Amino acid sequence: MNKSEHISKNLTAGKMRAIISLLEGESIAGAAKKARVSRTVLYQWLKNPEFLAILNENRERIFAEAISKLKAAASMAVDRLIEIVKSDNENEARLSSLGIVKFALKGSEYKDLEERIEKIEKILEERMPYVS
């Protein structure tokens, strides 16, 4: 999908180039150069709520896509680790086993922490119902 497809049609070509450049990780100076404007102008655009909202929406979209890809890759990686556990190569099997155990323990720790935080939040809500 073309990067500019997600960017508002209400923007000028310069603003679109600036947003795309910023999304690609360009510095302010680099994005301003690609947008063919001064850094001062780009800083003014960044203060504009509409421009900033479009930039942030696209950053969030890109981040969500990346997380989705990581989740898919994690599933493939776990499948591969499980295959390697069955390997005839003792060292590979051992390392894969250690990796699986390590990740399982971390997952368990995170789940435990999540449950504990939820309990704390519930207690705080009960004690201070008007604070949120």
Image (cartoon, helix red, strand yellow):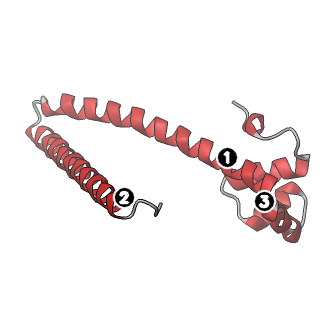
Closer to us: 74 or 122 = 122
The kind of residue on which mark 3 rests is Ala
The answer to whether the residues at label 1 and label 3 have Cβ atoms under 8 Å apart is no
Instruction: Provide residue 56's location: percent of width, then percent of height.
Output: 67, 52
Q: CA distance from mark 1 to mark 2?
A: 31 Å
Disc 2 residue type (three-letter) = Glu
Q: Earlier in the sequence, mark 1 or mark 3?
A: 3
The single residue placed furthest to the bottom in the displayed view is: 40
Residue 74, quarter of picture: top left
Image position of 96 (left or right of 124): left
User: Circle 1 is placed at which residue position?
Assistant: 57
Give the amino acid type for the residue marked by disc 1 in the picture: Glu
Packing grade of label 3 (10 A; few <14, some 14-19, many >=20) is: many
List x then y, in percent, for residue 40. 86, 71
Q: Quadrant of residue 35?
A: bottom right
Looking at the rendered structure, the number of numbered marks drawn on it comes to: 3
Q: Which residue is mark 3?
A: 31
Where is residue 73? Give x, y as percent: 39, 35
Q: Quadrant of the N terminus?
A: top right
Side (left or right) of 112 relative to 42 = left
The residue closer to the viewer here, 93 or 126, is: 126
Q: Which residue in the structure is indicated by mark 2? A: 125
